[in-house]
Amino acid sequence: ALAVADDGTLWSWGANGSSQLGQGDTAQRTAPTQIGSASNWTYVTCGNTSAYALNEAGELWAWGFNSSSQLGLGDTITRNIPTRVGSDSDWQTIVAGNSHVLAIKRDGSLWAWGSGSLGQLGHGDSSNRTTPARVGTQTNWVSASAGFSNSGGRTADGTLWAWGANTYGQLAN
């Protein structure tokens, strides 16, 4: 589990076999433990074995398992502490799926990276992306969601979008 406290500190606890707690090790934590000393965190989300956080400056940070480049750091190396993703400082929100990630920037653009094996990144192919890659040209995204191997989003005009695996009709198309 991960949480941002009212004072902007970042906390984690639970299983940690893939370093997803961001504590610098793989030890399990049975009580909330602060990650680092920063107090400017605004949002945190976790995928299957990785985690992502945004701070007040709009910077994106990631840590944990990275077999599909889901951390967005350009490689497949697991990180056991929060590591800054790129140099952009205009991230607004982020959601994590099983091994892929979607994020929206303050300009309303949608970005995706990690495993794209079933089209869940929305780039029109089944390729993985090792760093954040823009999805289309729209700048009116207001929310996104990431499932096991599918994704979705909503634009400012209320239109719902879905892409990726559809084995069980989860895209509702």
Image (cartoon, rainbow, N blue to C red):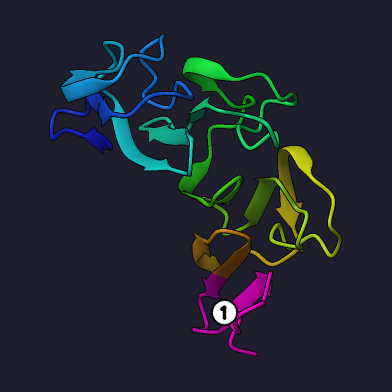
Tell me the quadrant of the picture where the C terminus can be found: bottom right
Inspect the magenta stretch and tell me whether residue 162 lies in it.
yes
Q: Is residue 111 above or below residue 7?
A: below
Secondary structure of residue under mark 1 = loop
Which residue appears at 84% of the width and 50% of the height? 127
> Which span of residues is magenta-colored?
153-173
Q: Above or below — where is 161 with respect to 149?
A: below
Nearer to the camera, 24 or 144: 24
Q: Residue 143 colored magenta?
A: no
- Residue 24 is situated, as x and y percent measured from the top left of the image, at 41, 9
Residue plotted at (42% across, 30% down): 57
Residue at 41 percent across and 34 percent down: it is 53
Task: List the residue tagged with mark 1.
Answer: 170
Residue 78 is at least partly visible in this image:
yes
In the rendering, at what x and y percent does residue 46 appear? Answer: 42, 41
Looking at the image, residue 161 lies above or below residue 132: below
Which quadrant does the N terminus fall into? top left
- Is residue 140 visible in the rendered structure shown here? no
